Every structure is written in C-alpha cells, then in structure tokens.
Image (cartoon, helix red, strand yellow):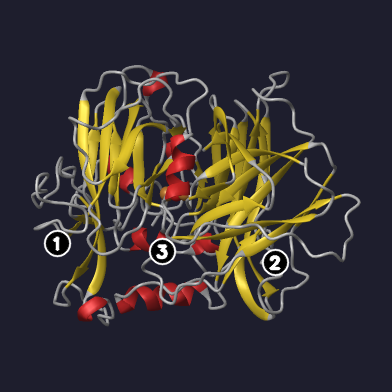
Amino acid sequence: GSTRFYDFKVQTKRITKVCKTRDIVTINGMYPGPVVYAQEDDRVIVRVTNETPYNATIHWHGVRQRLTCWSDGPAYLTQCPIQAGQTFTYEFTLVQQKGTLFWHAHISWLRGTVHGAFVIYPKTGVPYPFPDPYEEHVLVLGDYWFKDLQKLEKRVLASGGGAPAPDVYTINGHPGPLYNCSKNDVFKMDVIPGKTYLLRIINAALNIEFFFSIANHKLTIVEADGEYTKPFTVEQLMITPGQTINVLVEANQPIAKYNMAIGPYMSALFVPFQNISAVAHFQYSGASLTSMALPAPLPVFNDSLPVKNSMDGLRSLQATNLPLEIDTDLFITIGLNVEQCNSLTPNKSCQGPNGGVFAASMNNVTFVRPKISLLQAYYDRLHGHYTDDFPEVPLKSYDFVNGAPNNIPNNTQSLNGTRARVLEYGARVQLILQDTGIVSTENHPIHLHGYSFYVVGYGTGNFDPMTAEINLIDPPYMNTIGVPVGGWAAIRFIADNPGVWFMHCHLEIHTSWGLATAFIVKNGEGPLETLSHPPADLPRC
Ligand code: C2O
C-alpha cells in the first residue's frame, strides 16, 4: 500500500443553521469534516493540531488498529487529550480493511460536530463484488443543537436527568426544507435516469438512531460496517450511531425529484420527542427544479419490525476467521437505571425520575474514566488507575427464569469503577450482551474498538442457550451492534490484537453515564503479536 497524509486542524467555526448562528468545533472549519480516502492496506498518517481551547482526541471508528492501539483515540483509554496548542500524529495501517468507516472526536460530546467519513477503496484492480456503480456518494447523518454542546453536556450531566432532544437532524450538514428557515439548506444529489448509485451512509449522530428511506426507490444493502454483505433489498433501513451501511440505488423511476429522509427510531429518554425528519433530494436530471419533491415515508418512531427485517437480512458475503469453537464465554448485561440521590451522587441536582439520577452499567459496573490513559497505566504497570476484575457475570444476580425484560429484580443498582477484563492472546471469545430494559426501552448500539465481531445471534427477551438460534454460516461482521430493545445479541471474535480496547454504547449520553467497559488483550509470543511502543508525541495527562 501507499501512505496517505492528512492535516487535521481542530478549529472553532461560526456557522448558521436554521437561522441560528453559533460557534462549533470542527476539523479544518468543516461540518461534517473532511473525508479521509485511502485504499486497503494503506498506511494512514493524520497530524491533528488543536487550535481550540477544548481538549480533543480523534478515533478512527472501525479501523482495527492492528498492533497500533496508541492511535485508537478514545480519551483516557488509549491516550490523554490533545490539549490546546498541542499536536499528535495518528499513524496506522488499514490491514485487510476496506469499505465505509468514519472518524470522530472521542472525548466529551465533541463528536457531535467533529466527525467525517473514512472511505477505503479496494486494492487497485480488485473490483467490488457487485456491478460498478455509476457514482458514489457519502451521506453523513447527524444531530445538531442550537446550544453550545460543551455547556449542554456539563448541564445535563450535572442534572442527573436525561438529554434534551437535538434541535435539528442533518444530512451532510444540511437540515433540508422541513424545518423553519432552512428552505435552501438542502443536500442535493443529481442522478441520471437508468444509472446505479452507491450511497455510503454513516450515522454520526450523538444520540439518535435513524430510519432512512428514499421515496419510491429500493435500497440494496451491500456492505455494513466496512464488510461486504450478501445483497439484500429493503424499502427502509435503520442505522444506529456508529454504524455504516452501503446501499445501491437504481435510478429507475419516472423523472422527478425524490426525497431522501431520516427520522428517529425510539429514543424514549428524550423529552420532548422530536418527530421531524431531515430531508435531502435525489434529483433526476431533467426534473423541474421548482417541482415539489416526492415524500419519503418513514416507519413510526417505535416500529421495531423494519429494524428486525433489515437486521435479519445482513449476512456476510464471506465469513472468514469465524470462531466455531469458543473458549472464553462472557455474559454482559447492559443496563440503565435510576440511582437514588445520595452521597454517592455528588454534584448532581437529581433531576432524573423521582428525584433520582440516571446511571448506566455493564454487569452492574458503571465505568469511570481513569485520570491517565488505561493503556498507559497497563503498559507502564502503574498501579491505582484501574483493576482487572470486571465481573464475569452481573454483580447482581440475573434471574433467567423470572427476570423478564423490564421486570428484572435485584438488577438495578450499579457500582462505580474502572474495571477491565483481561483476555488471553488468541482467545476465542463469545459475548452475550443482554439488555435489562429497566428504565427505558431502547436499542443499545454496542461498539467494540480494535476488532470487528461476528454477530452470531440476537433476539428479544432473555438469552436462553437452549433455544437461541446461532448462525455459524454467514453472520455479519460488524463493529457496532444494536442490541434489540429488551433483548440480546451474541458476538464472537478472536482476541488477536493486543492492547486496551474500549467497548461502549454509541449513544453518547449512555457512555457518559458509564455504559462501557474495557478489554485488555495480552501480547502474543512473537513481534507480530506484540503491541508497539508509545509514539514519542503521545499526549501526557
Ligand atoms: Cu465510534 Cu468508542 O467510538
């Protein structure tokens, strides 16, 4: 491969959306940020200079960072923040990776405006496993607030209550004409009748799972999270924050202007609920520019059927390295809960339900970020920053027989801690992710750093090893899995990439509440199985 060099300047930029002007944090003044283009097996070097007063880091979401954990980017997990005026250069190789991924800030809620597409083409001469599209387009979906995100985050976390709904949804930064005062702020894609287009759809939103559809057009899914899938056609799809989906769309309808629309799926914790859609145009050449665009229907916000349908259709084109046998079998509950306001919840104004405070946990442990990076503490054997006793089963007994989703006794409390789970090099791991559904009924998009994983099963209700259907033939290979509302997902991977790898809900508010944990994967025997030394310019805390 060759080397791709990018220069990222973290900068504030004054922008106006929907007639409201504010300063947002960007890369190089762009919202969304610049697209990073590369080819499979390329070396990528991105120099990030922070010209803002805020702390920053950048994460390369979906890049597996083979032996380069130091360049992964989550703050206090693999590095300390890049402070005002500092520079850090991320360097990694896209080992056997291609497709659509993205990058985003990974500290506080900065990624709300600091994100962009990461497009990796196959090696020269290697075709797509489908007919070449006439053109390709990136669609970055986002959520946007009129309030300053840094202040909003502080206020929400101090309140102990839920996050407010975003003010606007955006497609490539544009809200579209359905909002007041944004008639002309529309992303437009010009298409030629009879041609086929590849859309690289990225959900970069902080907190919103989106339905997506195009009026009168079918979507053929050919890739998810940067891995090819067997082609599968749907009318509407759902994409969670952290997921990327490539679809082929054939411009085979009468010449006209068609809407491409996004609207929310679920989001029970957002009050008031915003059932409005952002719209872009899929515009045939020859269509009258002044004509109305045809509306794109979206499912109602709590309709889980289209979600299940598009999930059921996701099958790997080729499942290589799928562990058929497992030697490390972990059960991890995903829980939101309301803690009573007491001495354990200092600095909160207790505005959650019943005067409590929202919290979140995995196996009843609310993840607390350490003061220095966990990777550095591990690498330098520094004591007192974390413990390696993340529980193998929930701390509070999980009642498989009586504990139905939304009604699980004794499973509501959590303990704060920075507790990691150590995995032997080469372990064949299965994780059962079980939503406990105590407080809200939401789909939790769980994202694992450093790996893609096979989603070998999922379902509603409680995981039952006797009846669960497990697909060991062609499960999809993903980096973010929407664990169904009140349900479970089973994922498998081989722990062959040493380092410290964060796993968390990609709804940012849930990560803030502690819905996260970390894996420490040990080194293997040879140099090709050993974590690299820290880069010289790695930011220190
Ligand atoms: Cu896309 Cu830990 O993040």
Give the mark nearer the N terminus: 3 vs 2: 2
**Helix, strand or loop for disc 3:** loop
Which mark is on residue 176? 2
Marks 3 and 1 in Cβ contact (< 8 Å): no
Specify the amino acid type for callout 1.
Gln
Pick the front one: 46 or 14: 14
Mark 1, ligand 1, within 8 Å: the answer is no
Q: Is residue 43 above or below residue 159?
A: above
Mark 3, ligand 1, within 8 Å: the answer is no
Q: Residues within 10 Å of mark 1 (few under 14, many from 20)?
A: many
Q: How many marks?
A: 3
Which mark is on residue 413? 1
**Helix, strand or loop for disc 1:** loop
Mark 2, ligand 1, within 8 Å: the answer is no
Pick the front one: 434 or 392: 434
Question: Measured from the top left, where is residue 50 in percent x and y?
Answer: 58, 60
Q: Is residue 399 above or below residue 94?
A: below
Residue 314 visible: yes
Specify the amino acid type for callout 3.
Ser
Marks 1 and 2 in Cβ contact (< 8 Å): no
Question: Measured from the top left, where is residue 251 in percent x and y?
Answer: 77, 42
Q: Quadrant of residue 437?
A: bottom left
Which mark is on residue 267? 3
**Helix, strand or loop for disc 2:** loop
Q: Left or right: 12 with respect to 368? A: right
Question: Which residue is drawn at the image coordinates 21% and 76% (left, top)?
Answer: 356
Q: Residues within 10 Å of mark 2 (few under 14, many from 20)?
A: many
Q: Is residue 175 above or below residue 101?
A: below
Give the mark nearer the N terminus: 3 vs 1: 3
Q: Quadrant of residue 348?
A: bottom left
Question: Which residue is drawn at the image coordinates 63% and 78% (left, top)?
Answer: 22
